[in-house]
Structure formats: C-alpha cells, structure tokens
Amino acid sequence: MKIYTKTGDAGDTGLFAGPRVRKDDLRIEAYGTVDELNAVLGLVRSHATVGQAKLPAKIDAQLARIQHALFDLGAELATPDPKARGTSFVTPQEIGVLEQAIDGFEAQLPPLKTFILPGGTPGAAWLHLARTVCRRAERQVVTLAQREAGNFSPHVLVYLNRLSDLLFVMARAVNQLAGHPDVPWEKPSA
C-alpha cells in the first residue's frame, strides 16, 4: 500500500465511513490535535527524564496506555456516526483509570497552595506541553460537540478533561521524584 493517495491534494479528506470534508474542518482540527497530543506523549516517553534517569516504568506504562486510548479517541472523532460504525471506544472505565491515576499521584504530592509555572525538569516540561495540547484538543472538541449535538459521545470530552489533569499531576510528580520543587507563580506587586 502506498502512503500517498493524492486524494487530498485539493485540500479535502475523507472521514471514516463518511463524507469528504475540507482539511480545516472542525472535526479534522479536533482529531488532528489529538494526534498531535499523541506525538507529544511519544516525545515525553522517549526523551523525558527524572534527574538523570528515564521516566519511572509506572509513568511510562500509563503514558503508553494513554497513547493507545488517544488513537481510539481519534478514530471516534474521525467517524461522523461512531455508534453505528462501532468506533465509540472511550468508556467510563477508561475515564476511571485516569481518575485512579490522578488520585494516586495526588496522594504523594504536597497540596497546591498557589498556581505553579510549567517547567522544572525536562520530563515535567514535556508533560506540561502535553497538557496544553490536551487542553487545546478539549476546546476543539467542545465546539465540535456543540455542532454535532445528539451524535457525539460525552465521554470524549470528559476523557480529555481528566487527561489534562493527569498530565498536570504527572508533571508535578516527575519534578518531585527529581527533587525539583514546584515553581510558584508570583503575583505581581501593586
């Protein structure tokens, strides 16, 4: 199979079991941003470190599972009628997995008392970048869900919302494991 088909050369693409749409269609933007998030998570997994060591195996395994789930989520977004086509992959169980991971990390972190700046160790910085891409995907999905009312799984939006929270606490956990404290935001003086 050739990687290029030439069918999108005029600026349109085909949805899964659906019509052709412009490549700047909101649905394409949404699942394209989910794909971008997946790529950033690939960078996290291949380049992120905690101090001089690679990410802990537990975090790497969670990110691997999330990458698979994001591929499924992208397929759901790429399908105009996911229920009819069997691409409704995002479930409350997958959301529960994220919530359990969030709770586990938060139990090991000091409570937040102020906003923190993204950054710290390279691993935490990559995770903060992933979090911001996730939030952009979430915003695009909110708009898509409004347009597609009635034919859109609410689980997709909830999953992305929880995922951005998980990426935030993972970034804090990576900093903590490296002995790097959170960098608090400093309110400007009047």
Image (spheres, rainbow, N blue to C red):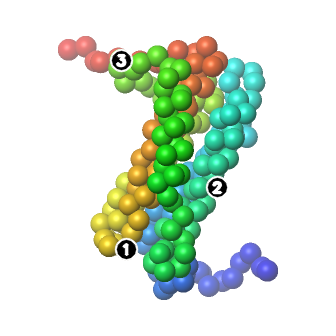
Q: Is residue 49 above or below residue 22?
A: above
Residue position for label 1: 151
Cα separation between marks 1 and 3: 40 Å
- The residue at the point 49 percent across, 46 percent down is 96
Identify the amino acid type marked 3. Answer: Lys
Identify the amino acid type marked 1. Answer: Asn
Image coords of residue 48 (percent x, y): 68, 33
Which mark is on residue 68? 2
The mark that comes first in sequence, 3 or 2, is 2
As rendered, which of 166 and 83 lies closer to the eye? 83
Q: At numbered mark 3, what does the secondary structure look like: helix, strand or loop?
A: loop
Looking at the rendered image, the disc whose residue lies closer to the viewer, 1 or 3, is: 1
Choose top left, top right, bottom left or bottom right for residue 177: top right
Identify the amino acid type marked 2. Answer: His
- Residue 152 in view, yes or no: yes
Q: Quadrant of the N terminus?
A: bottom right
Image coords of residue 74 (percent x, y): 55, 64
Pointer 1 and pointer 3: residues touching (CB < 8 Å)? Answer: no
